[in-house]
Image (cartoon, grey):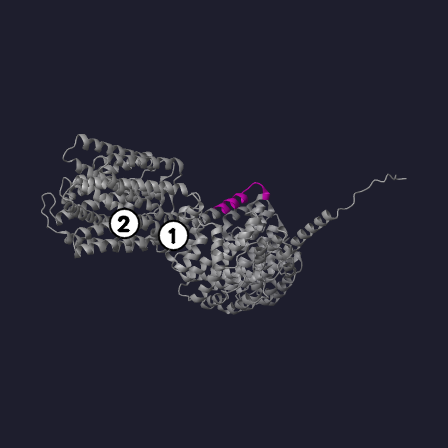
Amino acid sequence: MPHRVRRFLEIRPGEGLPVLLTFLYIWIVVASFLLAKPIRSGLFLGQHDAYDLVYVYAAVPLVLTLFVPLYTWVAARFGARTVTVVTLVGFSLNVLLFWYLFRFHSFRQLPDIFYVWVSCYGIIAPVQAWSFANSLFDTRQAKRLFGLIGAGASLGAITAGVLARVLVEPVGGTVNLLLVLALLIASAAAIVLTANLRIRRVGSNRRGRPVSRPFSAAWRQIVSSPYLRLLAGIVFAVAIATQWTSLQLGVVAKDHFAGSSTDITEFYGLFSFTTGVCSFLVQLLITGRVLRYWGVSAAILALPLAMATGNFFILLSPGFWSVLLTNGLDQGFRFSVDKAGYELLYLPIPPGDRASVKNAIDIVVNRVADAVGAVMLGLLTQGFFVLPGLGMDMRGMAAVNLVTVGIWLVLAWRVRSEYIRTIQDSIHRHRLDTERGTAAVTERSAAEVLVAKLSAADLSEVRYALDLIEGQQTRKWHPALRTLLTHPDADIRRRSLAALSATGDDSIAERVPAMLRDPDVGVRTEALLYLSRESGIDPLRQIEELGDFQDFSIRAGAAAFLAAPGRAQNLEAARLMIEGMARSGGPEGQRDRAEAARLIGAVQEGTFIDLLPPLIGDESIDVARQAIRAAQRLVRENFAPDLILALGRPELAEEAADALARLGDTVVRTISDALRSEEVSVEVRRELPSVLLRIGTAEAEQTLVASLLESDGTIRHRIIASLNKLRAVRPDIHIDPAVVELLLAAEIAGHYRSYQVLGPLRTQLKEGDPVIQAVRHSMEQELERIFRLMALLLPQAGLHDAYVGVRSSNVTVRANALEFLDNVLKPELRHVLVPVLDAQVTVEERIEIANRLVGAPLETPAQAVATLLDSEDPWLRSCAIQAVGRLRLGGLVPQLKKYEAAPDPLVRDAVVAARATLAGDSRRLLERQHPAPPDLDLGVGAG
């Protein structure tokens, strides 16, 4: 298919063959059914009164009651792929049998039997065809392509009309048209067989072992789901309304053509042709746009509104032309807008359940409605079997049908909100499953690895696990650590006790006294420190009894004992000892300083708090951590400046943030000033939003809102994320939507600008290049900020679920997430955002959109790199500087000067590397232009 044609039809690469075969399949099936309709109508009305149709209407569900269990059993045993082909071949052979009987062995009931057969075929074959389409395309593809594919149904109506109108006399009458019908159905079987061999189908109809799902299970699912109940209700109302409209057409056609089978067949053929042409034009030119711009709700409301209009005309003026108009509206909209929209309603159903649910609703519910409609129709008109009728005329039927169409409209209006809710439920379940699975796997894996290493026979493995635990400082691994208190290796016993002691584990208090007699002095020291802190044991007495403890443990234990409440308390002496420990210099004094910080926090009166700030900024991570924990317990506002600086150290950031959060509103002003200050390092400022989130007060929230326009992308990202989390806890907080909308517009424009940058770079660099990776990483952050901002505007819209969904590798989940966004976002936002999320939109297409929205297109790699150099992200800027060297962009060298003294070392190193690369190129160029003279052997000897 030529590219321009494919683009006009919105067919993506790889979709051509599935679209073509599906289009042909639906075309042939509808053509065969609509050809069979005038044949059955001509044969039946040529022999019976029009009101006798109520009997065949009632007979159809009885026949399907026998067919559906057999069909379900075969599909479960051999697969839907096989049963579709077998069914179509069987239908084709049935038609040949009917032709033979009509030609050579006709009997009075044969037209009745054929009418029932055609009705059954008209239910089963289209359901199979659309199930086939649903198995090939996801929600997004269906919304884009079903308008085009559905045009096959309209083209089928045209084809049937032409065949019925033109061939009825040349082939020798109505009966011989059955041979044409058999050929059409056999062609449909050949198309499906080709598709099964050439196309891999998804969902419940994929290749592999068939899955049996009893009808009872599908029915229970329908009954338990509000959404599926609404779908079943719509199908029920549609079946009755269209059945009554069809009977009205039969009545007026019988009278108008005086019961002539040939004339009635030609009339129905002309009618199918005319409505088919109108339907085809609507399908090709309007349906796709309706689905894209107004969604499913507009598509499924079109037909009932048209039917209401037609029945209103019948009510006003019953007659041939008003009935013809109503049926024309029915046929024209049913095979164009309505069918494509209706089939989309099944796509939120999980693929494994979709086929069985669809069969249950479209076949069983539809036919039950036919039976109910037939009985009602008989009772309201000329009677049904032995029951007398009310004698209602055409106007009365139209009045009752208006009530049915009104119920249909109400159900169709309600199904839209349930459609959105069902999609949201599916992506919400996916998000919960993803988060639960990831967390469980991560936690289980970490636990299994550490427990395995802690119990390993190899001492190096045990020490490695202890290194990890000491770095995390968490209580999670206590059970495994407690087993190591009796480990043969003294160093492992000591480190295990120290780790348990550091987190205040009181479950080992009964075991520690025995460790005071451990053969190793290090173990005895840790035991003494634990007991001094946790149990208030006099360390001097223990030292006298046992002796031989390390010096720092003696001082720490004595200071803890003297600072403890009681008769022996001596705060001045304790202060002198703690002060001396806090001032112990160098690496050798690290343990003294750590114990000093721990002791300062243990004295609840805060007697020694003036000694703590220097320890919070200590170069030793362990000392600083113990000091921050002391600050958490003491809660003093004067610790705030030092705790803020500690946020810049990744190992301490989490605990420093907790310590600051305990200060509450008293520290918000200080944090706000630091957040705006250029003198505070960017590493520190990036941690401040999480502190404000932990504080969680109205003042903290206002500080976050006031900082939304922060220029640094990472800081802005964390501010937005903190506001999202804060709103989840406090939904009553007010955020000015104008500010959020302004920032959202800027983020979307920035994201499209990133695509403009990415375009030229992709022509020169491979996908795995650091510059490309940096741009893509930055774009991921931009996209997350966009979703978080939208969540601030629409807090109840489930945008977190949608964000997880659009990032899923599952095609169905991703399509459902995009369909959800299509229905909840404002049109102006949807039209610019969905293209960057839809995987079926190429990068080139996104760049074209960016050039229209943002302007100033970037055509060369030099322009793209120059744009990246102005980025606020140091990592992105450093990658751009490296690209200057790798891409030999000498024209950008002057711009590198302003980054030679950049505060970020990553940027400075990138400048050096880029200059070295460019200098090497210049040197090699000079060598090629002015080569060095070769060494000459003049034959002069050493002597």
Q: Disc 1 designates what residue?
A: 819
**Residue 441 or 598: which is nearer the viewer?**
441
The x and y percentages for residue 64 are: 22, 39
* Residue type for callout 1: Glu
Label 1 CA crowd tier, 10 Å (few <14, some 14–19, many 20+): many
The residue positioned farthest toward the front in the image shown = 170
Left or right of residue 375, residue 73 in this image: right
At x 17%, y 56%, the residue is 315
Could you tell which of marks 2 and 1 lies nearer the N-terminus? Answer: 2
Circle 1: element type? helix
Q: What range is drawn magenta here?
A: 444-460
Q: How many discs mark residues in the rendered view? A: 2
- Residue denoted by label 2: 332
Where residue 109 appears, x then y in whole percent? 15, 36
Give x and y (percent) for residue 46: 15, 40
Dot 2: element: helix
Verify whether residue 764 appears in magenta. Answer: no
Residue nearest the viewer, comparing 746 with 212: 746
* Residue at (60, 51) in percent of width and height: 524
Question: In the drawing, what numbered circle is on residue 492?
Answer: none
What's the residue type where badge 2 is placed?
Gly
- Give the main secondary structure, helix, strand or loop, of the magenta stretch: helix
Above or below 762: residue 867: below
Q: Is residue 855 visible?
A: yes
Point out the frontmost of discs 2 and 1.
2
In the rendered image, the quadrant that contains the N terminus is: top left
> Can residue 639 be seen by looking at this rendering?
no
Q: CA distance from mark 2 to mark 1?
A: 27 Å
Q: Position of residue 533 (x, y in %)?
A: 55, 58
